[in-house]
Image (cartoon, helix red, strand yellow):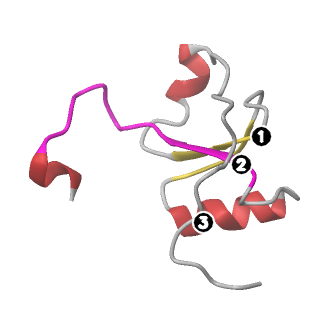
Amino acid sequence: MSQSNSLPESTSEIAPVNFSEAELEKHRGHWLAFSPDGQRVIASSRMLKELEKQIRAAGADPEEVLLDHLPESDAIQFGSELS
């Protein structure tokens, strides 16, 4: 398995479908990998490196998943908070 610094961006134009607030709440502060069709969460982790491991363990191709990050809160972050 080759090591990468981050997961590649998805080439899919499909956005994840709507998930319930309760489902998303379980993933606050995590990176999410959605199936290419956006229908299900394949993996969830606070760290991208761990997310990639989970994606591969689920038998999915990291280059074909949709990625998103759910912040800890709904607050808008500015400047130094993002770095």
Q: Are marks 1 and 2 in contact (CB under 8 Å)?
A: yes
Rendering quarter of residue 51: bottom right
Q: Is residue 16 left or right of residue 45?
A: right
Q: Which residue corresponds to mark 3?
A: 50
Q: Which residue corresponds to mark 2?
A: 65
Closer to the eye: label 1 or 3? 1
- Callout 3, which amino acid? Glu
Q: Which residue corresponds to mark 1?
A: 36
Residue drawn 35% across the image and 37% down it:
72
- Callout 1, which amino acid? Pro
Q: Position of residue 53 (x, y in %)?
A: 70, 67
Looking at the image, tell me whether mark 1 or mark 3 is earlier in sequence order: 1
Looking at the image, tell me whether mark 3 or mark 2 is earlier in sequence order: 3
Q: Position of residue 5 (x, y in %)?
A: 51, 77
Which element type, helix, strand or loop, lies under badge 1?
A: loop
Q: Which residues are magenta?
A: 64-78
Total numbered labels placed on residues in the image: 3
Rendering quarter of residue 19: top right
